Amino acid sequence: MKINITRNELKLMATGFTKIVPGTKGPACCGLVRLSVRNSILTAQATDLDQTATFQFEKAEGDGTGEVFIPFQTLRDLAKGTPTEKVTIVSLDDNSVSVTNPLGEHSVTTTLQTEKPADWPADQEDIPVSEAIGFLPSFRKIAPFASADDTRPMLCGVLVDTNSSGDHPSTLVATDGRRLTCFNSLRLPLNDKDGIIIPVTRFLLWNDLPNQVDLGIAKTQGQRWVCIKAGPWTYVTKTLNGCYPNWRQVFPKVDPEANRIEFTDADALALGKIIPALPCQSGQVGVISLQGQNGSLHLGGTDSVKKAYTVPLTGGSVYSGPGCTLYVDKRFLLQALNAGFRRFLFSGAGSPLLSRDEHGGTHLLMPIRTEQTPEPNPATPTPEAPATTDPENTHVESSPGTPPQPAAQLETHQEKANMNTDPLNTQEPTTSTSALEALQASFESAKTKLRDAQSALVEVGASLRDALKEERQRRTEAESVRSTLRKLQSIRV
C-alpha cells in the first residue's frame, strides 16, 4: 500500500484531530491515527474511545488496500512545510512503514514501526444520517450555557428534546444550574421521547467544522451514539445516558409590567468591553449590579476596598419599572448578551430574569443573593395558571392562590432526595454552601496575593537586572580610566 498526501490536507486533518487526541497520556490507541485505503479512497481516523472522528482526503493518492497506524505527533510534524508538497507513506510489512518527507529539493526517508493497538475500538456499522439544517450553529450558540461541572454529567451536554409539536418540534436545552437556555426553532431528523443529550466537545465547537451537517443516532449494546457528517468529516460520539431535568417546569410567569430591561445592540457591544473591566469585591468575584431608576440603566461594581463604581449605559438601553437593583454574575450576563438576548423581565431583585429573543430562544438567569437583596414578600402571591408543555410558551404556573417560589427548580428523578443541589434552586444558602463560598473567597484572596507576590518578584528581577547593568557599565568605565592612567604613566618626558 502506497499513499501520497499533500501537506495542506495533512494540516487540516491534524487540526481537527487535536480536538480528539487527548493532551495527556491515555490508552495506547489515543495517540495513534489509522490511515485506511479502500477503493482508492484514503481516510484517517482518531479516537479517545468515547468519540471518533474520521477524515476523508480529497486530493490524496492511494494504491492498494490496507491500513496502518501512525503516531499522531508524527503526522502533525509532517504537516509542517510547503502546503503543496506531498508526503509519501509506503507499507513495508504488517508492522512497519517508510515515510518520505520532502524538504525543499531534498527528501528524508525514515522507517516507522507500526502495530494495531489491542484497545482500538471495533468498527461500527454506518449510522444513517439526514440533513439537520441549523443544528450546528444553534448547538454552538447554546453550548456556553451548559455546565462544566463533572460531578453533574447530565448538565454537561445539550439536550435535544423532540417532544414538541408544530413546525419546529426539536428544542435544544442547556443549563448549568444558575441559568437555562433553550432554542426551539429547529426540525431535526431525530425522534426519541426521552430526549438525546449530546456532550459539549471541543470538536463540535471547532469553528473550522462546516456548519451544514447531516445528523443521525443509533443504539448498540445499550449505548446510544450520535453521528454528525460535515464536509470531509464524520464524527461519532456517545450520548450522555441519564435523566435530564424537567426543564419545562422551570420558567416562571412574569408580569411584563413589573420590571423590564432592554439592552440595545450598541450597549451590548460596549458591555463586551466594560463588563470584564468592572471591579469586583473580594469574596464576590464576578458579581455586578444592574441599577434601574427613572427609565435609565446603570452597571455597578465594588472593588476589594469596597469602593463603588457606577457606569451609565448611554447607547439607548432603558429600564421600565418602579426602580430596582439586582446582582448578577457578569460572565453570565455577557454570555446572554452575546447569544442575542436583549429584553429581560423580572418581578423583583430576588426573582429570575426571563428573556425571549425573536428566533425561538428563551433564557432564564438567576440573580445572586447579597445582603442588599430584598426577600420576596410571601404575603402578596401572584395568581398563576396551570402549567403548559408548549416550548414556545414555557411557563410553569400554579393554581390560583399559590405563593410564587423565589425561583423554579430543575429536578431529575435521581436528585429528588437532594433538593439543595437542584439547578436553579434559590433557597437560602446552607451551612455547607456558606463554607464553600468562604473557601472560594479564601482561594481568590490567596490567588490575588500570589499575583501580587509574582508582580513584586518581577519588579525585583527588573531592578536586579538594572543594577547588574549599571555595575557592568561602572566596571567598564573604571577599566577605561585605569587603561588611560596606565597609558599616561607610560609616557616619559
Image: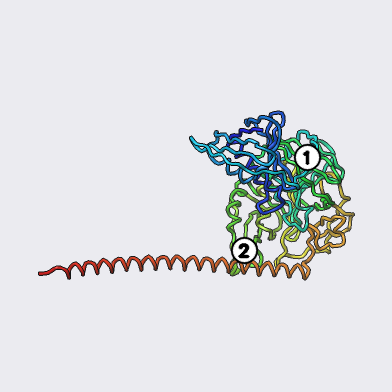
Label 2 sits on residue: 280
Q: Residue at x 58, y 68 (%)?
A: 450
Q: Residue at x 71, y 61 (%)?
A: 368
Q: Amino acid type of disc 2? A: Cys
User: Which image quadrant: the N terminus?
Assistant: top right
Q: Pick whichever, 83 or 293, lies toward us.
A: 83
Label 1 sits on residue: 123
Q: Does residue 206 lie above or below 321 as drawn?
A: above
Q: Amino acid type of disc 1? A: Asp
The percent position of residue 340, horizontal first and vertical second, equals 68, 45
The percent position of residue 323, horizontal first and vertical second, equals 69, 59
What label sits on residue 138 in the rendered view? none
Question: What SS does tag 2 mark?
Answer: loop
Q: Is residue 395 left or right of residue 479?
A: right
Question: What SS does tag 1 mark?
Answer: loop
Q: Quadrant of residue 420?
A: bottom right
